[in-house]
Image (cartoon, rainbow, N blue to C red):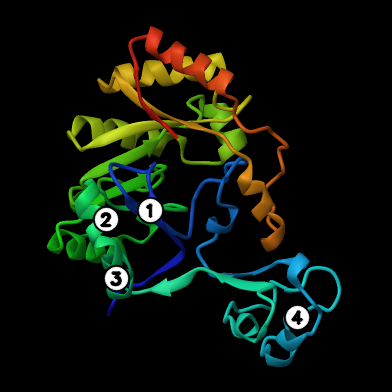
Amino acid sequence: MTPTAPIFEIQRFSLHDGPGIRSLVFLKGCALHCPWCQNPESQASDPVVAFYRDRCKESFCCEEVCQDSAISRTGFRIDYERCSGCGDCVAACAYDALRRIGEVHTPELLMQKLLADRAYYQQSGGGVTFSGGEPLLHPLFLDRVLDLCARESIHTNLETSGTSSFERHEALLRKFDLIYFDLKILDPELHREHLGGGYDIIVHNAAWLAEGKYPVEFRLPLIPGYTDTEANIEHVIERLGRLGMNAIHLLAYHNMGETKIDIIQGKQPKLGLPRYSEELFEKTQRHFEERGIEVLNRH
């Protein structure tokens, strides 16, 4: 049986998710519930129909084709308790007010799309980066795609939050040319409060990758008041020392994810935080560099 996975976006010509020019493949599904999530539409594994209220002309062609009786004429357009995510309403809407997020792909279909940019990968030393959500929720799909990429000599990178069993995926992880591992909140209690479960497995997986000499680089998203506190930065520096690592990527927060919450009636809070400032970034960068940690590059 051919493995499949729900992909909600393929971003072409990315310059910030690995070396060279890259295609960034976003897969749905995540075990964490970060309140600052940049892709709230990625958290659930199943496809979801998004509603863009400002585009809707209330023609209700969507209602005519919906076999689930999931169209509401008042308030939010989609009744998710009834909606099967089939996408018939999306095809019927002439105004692009509805969009199905999470199209199921086979490895071969994805490769067909990725190979269109093979020349850019070759010229720039780029490749494909798998993000999400958490890509490792789809191991059989990834395993086949990685084999296809290797056949075409395409560099591959994984962006992971480290919430699944890495020992179980050892053979799969060895196939990646590069792994970006996010360290977020390294206080166990604060992690549980803000992100949910998974702290112990994240810490274990970070050590397992480092000890196994995997091509791993660690990243810290800089979220004001959450991850950029002096205490958390010290925790991260201390953890890097334990892992024998002396470099990190810093990811400056932007609030673009909040614009996506309303289109899926997401439960994620709107933090109202500003975009991470240049001044704050430079201050945090100096903090790491003064402690002997190289900041690899900024995103």
- Is label 1 in contact with label 2 (beta carbons under 8 Å)? yes
Position of the C terminus by quadrant: top left
Position of the N terminus by quadrant: bottom left
Secondary structure under the numbered disc 2 in the rendered image: helix
State left or right for residue 293 relative to residue 74: left
Kind of residue at badge 4: Ile
Kind of residue at badge 2: Tyr
Q: Disc 3 or disc 1, which is closer to the eye?
A: 1
Task: Give the numbered dot on residue 119.
Answer: none
3D distance between C-alphas at marks 4 and 3: 33 Å
Which residue lies under the disc numbered 1?
Answer: 13
Q: Disc 4 or disc 2, which is closer to the eye?
A: 2
Return the disc, 3 or 2, that comes first in the chain's sequence. 3
Which residue lies under the disc numbered 4?
Answer: 71
Which residue lies under the disc numbered 2?
Answer: 120
3D distance between C-alphas at marks 1 and 2: 8 Å
Kind of residue at badge 3: Pro
Q: Disc 4 or disc 1, which is closer to the eye?
A: 1
3D distance between C-alphas at marks 3 and 1: 20 Å
3D distance between C-alphas at marks 4 and 1: 37 Å
Can residue 172 be seen at all in this image of the molecule? no
Secondary structure under the numbered disc 1 in the rendered image: strand
Task: Tell me the quarter of the picture where residue 228 sits.
Answer: top right
Above or below: residue 23 compared with residue 82: above
Which residue lies under the disc numbered 3?
Answer: 107
Badge 3: how crowded within 10 Å, few (<14), some, or many (20+)? many
